[in-house]
Amino acid sequence: MSLIDTHCHLTSKALFRDMFGVCQRARAAGVARMITVATDAADSRRAIAAADHYRGVSATVGIHPHEAAKVKAGDWQLLRELRHNPNVVAWGEIGLDYHYDFADHKTQQDVFSAQLADARRSGLPVIIHCREAVADVVAMLEDHGYRDRRVVFHCFSDASDEADEIVDRGWWLSFTGMVTFKNSKDLRDIARRYPLEQLMLETDAPYLSPEPHRKIKPNEPRLLVHTAAFLADLKGVTPAELEALTTANAELFFGL
């Protein structure tokens, strides 16, 4: 098995202290590559350090909407410098989150807009965090000329019509262990009809451990195998076929 976890947080407090063990266990389980996704400028530096040090790890740069109110002037220059590292494969995760109040909507939108502009100039694909904000995220992506460019809405869990709106614009969805949860019927229906040629898998570790290990905390990339097995059954393909397809998709999307 040679799966790719397209979205995890190896630099989170829950995983950072045992990053060597986390990576070792992932490879032993068949997760050959991991993309550790940054949440602010300092975390972008840590993510790149992890990618530079650990085999099979790539990194992103970006500022999560939860961190938008904490951005300092020097963060922008740091991100623009860090994105040139050869192990950086995307800009993210960036976007809007209207569920929590860590930053007001206007601040989130300003930080998101600035990053969309920088990401567009860099040529990097974009990883989107979107919670209860699909209309505004879609509008801002459109305004920045992202239709049919490499955009993935990570950990997708919104409504079916919103999934259609995203896919119709040439953007991708990725699925976490949430799809295995017993109360995720609507998300499973979306995943069932989502095109195999765009399907990507992620853990969002240390969050969202999949069934049958939902009680395991923290989640780790090694548990991606359970989401993969579940989706193979849901899509009516063999585990080997799903592995090959999702790996090829991730390699294409992120230029791995």
Image: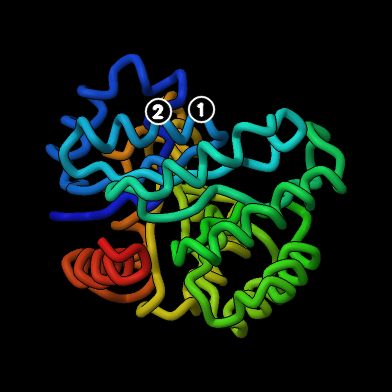
Q: In the rendered view, would you say 127 is above or below 52?
A: below
Compared across the picture, whether 58 is left or right of 54 comes to right
Compared across the picture, whether 147 is left or right of 246 comes to right
Q: Secondary structure at mark 2?
A: helix
Question: Which image quarter is the C terminus in?
Answer: bottom left
Circles 1 and 2: CB atoms closer than 8 Å: yes
Q: Label 1, label 2: how many angstroms apart (C-alpha)?
A: 7 Å
Q: Secondary structure at mark 1?
A: helix
**Does the rendering let one see residue 59?**
yes
Residue 73: image x %, image y %?
Answer: 68, 33
Q: Which residue is mark 1?
A: 42
Residue 170: image x %, image y %?
Answer: 54, 81
Nearest the eye: 166 or 73: 73
What label does residue 46 carry, if any?
2
Q: In the rendered view, would you say 54 is above or below 178?
A: above
Q: Is disc 1 surrounded by few (<14), some (14 to 19) or many (20+) residues within 10 Å? A: some
- Residue at horizontal 68 percent and vertical 71 percent from the top: 144
Tag 2: residue type? Arg
Question: Which image quarter is the N terminus in?
Answer: bottom left
- Residue at horizontal 80 percent and vertical 64 percent from the top: 136
Count of numbered tags: 2
Q: In the rendered view, would you say 195 is above or below 54?
A: below
**Does the rendering let one see residue 226?**
no
